[in-house]
Image (cartoon, rainbow, N blue to C red):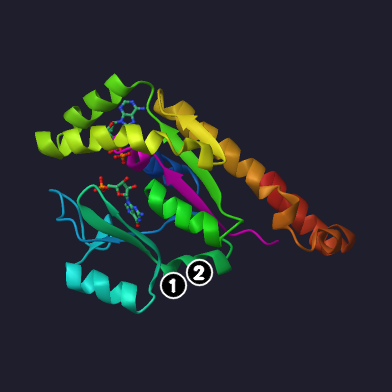
Amino acid sequence: MDGGFLLVLSGPSGSGKGTVSEALMKNNDDIIFSTSVTTRTPRPGEVNGENYFFATREEFEEMVEKGELLEYAFVHTNYYGTPKKFVFDEIEKGEIVLLEIDVQGALQIKEKYKEAVFIFLIPPTMDELKSRLVKRDTETEDEIETRYRNAFKELDFVGEYDYFVINDVLENAVSSIENIIAAEKLRVKRHKDIKKEVQAEEERDKWLYHLLKN
Ligand code: ADP
Ligand code: 5GP
């Protein structure tokens, strides 16, 4: 089986990317989160190397210069980027690598990696988005306002994505993404040796087992 691919999840701040990603990874062992590097300061409770790799502006610029990032962008008021090596290593192992990144980063990935899958997470309403940002209580009033204003601009890019998912009831949003992943796993283009897989009896059994298991 081939199998690994990039799963890009974008959506306005507060649309629920973090919450949805966490639920997805709880249920699906083959989805691996790509931890980004950022110059933003950690929020209370955030762990370096887990939520993000927190870096200084100089450290971030050095990574850019050395070509260590798959994509990067200036989002709201800080730099964010995806370390390249981790992503390639995991895809090579057949994992689905989840990138929770903004639209600018997603467009860079789209230019370079045609086989990536792009999902845009949408809040049920803009009022609900605002109220989730306020309730999350992780930003100042000004920062919330910046994120809310940027949300309108980000929504303009939904047409660049393969799928949209509305995050109204969390469980429904998660299962929609699981359905997308299930369909993507069955794309013929992701199984370059599909004839061989079917023809060789032993391989075929393995293939059917894998399909049934997932
Ligand atoms: P993002 O990662 O896109 O910025 P979060 O995952 O932090 O968004 O979600 C923003 C806030 O909304 C959090 O407080 C989270 O608990 C809440 N939230 C996420 N999804 C839902 C949902 N489906 N229904 C209600 N609240 C939600
Ligand atoms: P936050 O500061 O709320 O964690 O994230 C702010 C925004 O940065 C979110 O829209 C998030 O998707 C985006 N982001 C996080 N990591 C990356 C990354 O590696 N690259 C890009 N381009 N955006 C990212």
Queried whether the magenta region covers residue 9, the answer comes back as yes
Residue 105 coordinates in the image, percent (x, y): 40, 54
Q: Which residues are magenta?
A: 1-19
The residue located at (20%, 38%) in the rendering is 146
Q: Is residue 3 above or below residue 159?
A: below
Residue 142 coordinates in the image, percent (x, y): 11, 36
Queried whether the magenta region covers residue 160, the answer comes back as no
- For disc 2, the marked residue is 88
Q: Amino acid at mark 2?
A: Phe
The residue located at (80%, 58%) in the rendering is 194
Residue 185 coordinates in the image, percent (x, y): 65, 49
Which is nearer the eye, 44 or 67?
67
Which is nearer the eye, 109 or 82?
109
User: In which quarter of the view is residue 157 placed?
Assistant: top left
- Which residue of the protein is positioned furthest toward the bottom in this rendering? 66
Is any part of residue 152 visible from this angle? Answer: yes
Q: Which label sits on residue 136?
A: none
Few, some or many C-alpha atoms within 10 Å of disc 2 (few <14, some 14-19, many ≥20)?
some
The residue located at (24%, 37%) in the rendering is 147
Could you tell whether 15 is left or right of 172 in the image? left
- For disc 1, the marked residue is 85
Residue 86 coordinates in the image, percent (x, y): 43, 69
Is any part of residue 15 visible from this angle? Answer: no
Quarter of the picture containing the C terminus is top right
Q: Amino acid at mark 1?
A: Lys
The residue located at (57%, 69%) in the rendering is 92
